[in-house]
Structure formats: C-alpha cells, structure tokens
Image (tube, rainbow, N blue to C red):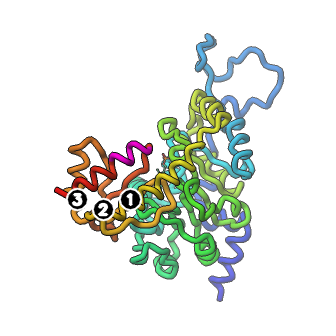
Amino acid sequence: MQWRWSLDAAINNPLLLMKRYIRKNILELEPYSTARDEFQGGDISVWLDANESPYPNGVNRYPDPHQKRLKERVSQLTGVAPESIFIGGAGSDEAIDVIFRVFCTPGKDNVIAIAPSYGVYKVAAAVNDIEIREVLLNEDYSLPAERLLAAADENTKVMWICSPNNPTGNAFPKEEILSLAAKFDGIVVVDEAYADFSEKGSLLSEIGKVKNLIVLRTFSKAWGMAGLRAGMAFSLPEINEYFGRVKYPYNMSSMIQEELMRRIEEGTSDHIPEIVSERNRMAKALEKAGCVGRVYPSDANFLLVKVKDADALYGYLIKNGVIVRNRSRMPLCSETLRITIGTPSENDRTISLINEFNNL
Ligand SMILES: *Cc1c(COP(=O)(O)O)cnc(C)c1O
C-alpha cells in the first residue's frame, strides 16, 4: 500500500517527518536573531549590543534565550539530550501552544484528542483555529486505539494523549501508546504531567527512538513549583529546533531560570512517596463513605470519585472551606468530583466532611 510505505518512511526519517508534519511557513521561517545569538564568543567586558541598561540591578541583562545551563541540568535529570529539550516559561501550557503553531495550519489542519482530558488542548486548538476531534475513552477509561486512528484524515497532524489522564487519573499502558505511535501518520504528544506519581513508567526513554513522539513534563505538580510556570517538551532534535524558532525569544526570565536551577539542586520532589501513600489511604477511606459510589484507580496526585449527588457534595465542601473540582459535566464523568491529594490533615478533614455529608 502506497500510504503505508510513505508512513513508515516518514516516521522513521527525521527529514521526511519534518517535511510531512511541520507547517510550510514554519519550515521556511527566518527566526528572530537576538543580540546574544549573533555574539560568537570572545573575551567581552563591555556589553553594548542589546540596548540594555548598563547599571547592574540583578536583572538589567537579557536572559539566555536558549536556557543552556537549565537544559543541561534537565538533561542530567532526565537522561534526554539538551538538543531534545524545550522549556516553556508559561508552563507546559506554552509547549502545548507551540506544538499547535509548529504543526497545524489554521483553518485547515486538525488534531485528535481523547475525551475527557485536559482542557487546555481544546482551548489552544480553538485559539489557533484548529479543529479538534475528540474521541471518547472506552467506558472503563481505557484507550480507544482503533477509534483514535479511525478519526484521522489527511489533514490530521497531532494526537493528544494525556497519561496519567486528567481527570480520569489512569495511566495508559506504554505498549498501547507506542503501538498507536507506530500506526499514526502524525505526531503523538504524550502529556506526562503526573507521571512522577505513577508506577506505570514514562515514555521519556523513547525520545529519539520513536521519531513521531513528543513527551510533555512540568515542574508544576510533583516538583511543587506551579507558581514558577515552567514546563518541558521532549522531542527529536530536528523537531525541537523548530520549537526554539517559534517560541518567544526570551520566554523564560533570568530569575526563573536561576530559581529553577537552585530548587532542582535542593531536590524538591521529596513529597512524592507521601502523596502516593496519602492517595492510596484516601481512596480506601472514601470507598467506605456511603455517598461514594466509586473511587477510580489513580496513577496521579488526585482521585476521581463518583458520588451520589456531586453538585450537593461540592457545595457542602465549599461551605466548609474545602474546594475540589466538580467534573460532572465532562463526558463519561457524570456525578464525579476530582479531589487533589493534600497534606495528611487536609485529607483527614476532607474525608470526615464527606462522611458527615453522608449522614445529613
Ligand atoms: C496541570 C497539568 C499540566 C501542567 O501545566 P503547566 O502549564 O505546566 O502548569 C499539564 N498537563 C496536564 C494534563 C495537567 O493536568
């Protein structure tokens, strides 16, 4: 089959892959060249190339647009080469938008996403005037591989898979995602924002091997730095190069780059085991509550819980100072609340409020 031949060729050859999936205007883009890009090294003590203020105040100089030192640190952490790393200064939300802008021609191309899933894919698609084809998960929240592939046509460029998935909480088996990537004529993005809480592993080690794979990670969840706004995309160097061209040149401030490196040294991800054990404790406790119909298995730092009257319980928790997320209006999620795992005492309080509601 001609199509099969070209797909195999494209997803195994970076140059063909880029031509096939990257927008033409982006392939031809002459990127903005910053003052510091043109500087080729040398023993400089007077910097008069960037119209900065010469008076030192900690932030008078432009930051490194390529975040070289930070990428080296992230490379040590992940085992992925710096050339394969994109870091967004607006979290992985920035990576999501950059992916749309690199691969999808507005008004023409489309993407496929699982549903229910993270809301930003849909909003970023709409902002970029890209059709998003949402494919319902199976009833048990497993991956509908055949239906995902069937939703594609010749203008489909990207498939969004969130694993562990928000809000359902489950991670999909690695082999299933890899098998999808092998059959899909396009780019597969796996959003692993919650992978640090999962025992099902990560696809990071496949970067470079599976050419049409992009993996997203974030400092917002397990690393505890949601306020810093730093997210990552890992991909083939040939693809990552175009993310670098399309992003805003100085997309991450020097203070954030330094703060991230400082906190990575400190190793702030120590809370993962406690959050995982609290998640499992809370799941057991909630299963016993009378108003709880089901606690879905979770590979993340939250629980999706099916309850008798989600709106009423949601209101009751708020009245008592606890806010959770009501996901009842999402597909396949009727009467559900998504509850983030907090500190042990916060979890205790939430469990007792839910038991109390039960007895009202
Ligand atoms: C929270 C979350 C993110 C993280 O977004 P940031 O912009 O990095 O804070 C990414 N993907 C999913 C599915 C999430 O739930």
296 vs 81, left or right, is left
Q: Amino acid at mark 1?
A: Ala
Q: CB at mark 2 closer than 8 A to ligand 1?
A: no
- Which secondary structure lies at badge 1? helix
The reply to whether the magenta stretch includes residue 336 is no
- The residue tagged 2 is 289
| Mark 2 and mark 3: Cα distance apart in space | 7 Å
* Tag 1 and tag 2, C-beta contact below 8 Å: yes
The secondary structure that dominates the magenta segment is helix
Q: Earlier in the sequence, mark 2 or mark 3?
A: 2
- The residue tagged 1 is 285
Q: Amino acid at mark 2?
A: Ala
- The residue tagged 3 is 358
- Give the extent of the magenta segment: 344-349
Tell me residue 154's x, y (percent).
52, 75
Q: Residue at x 64, y 31 (%)?
A: 262
| Mark 3 and mark 1: Cα distance apart in space | 13 Å
Rendered-image quadrant of the C terminus? bottom left
Q: Nearer the viewer, residue 178 or 354?
A: 354
* Tag 2 and tag 3, C-beta contact below 8 Å: yes
269 vs 130, left or right, is right
- Which secondary structure lies at badge 3? helix
Tell me residue 304's x, y (percent).
38, 61
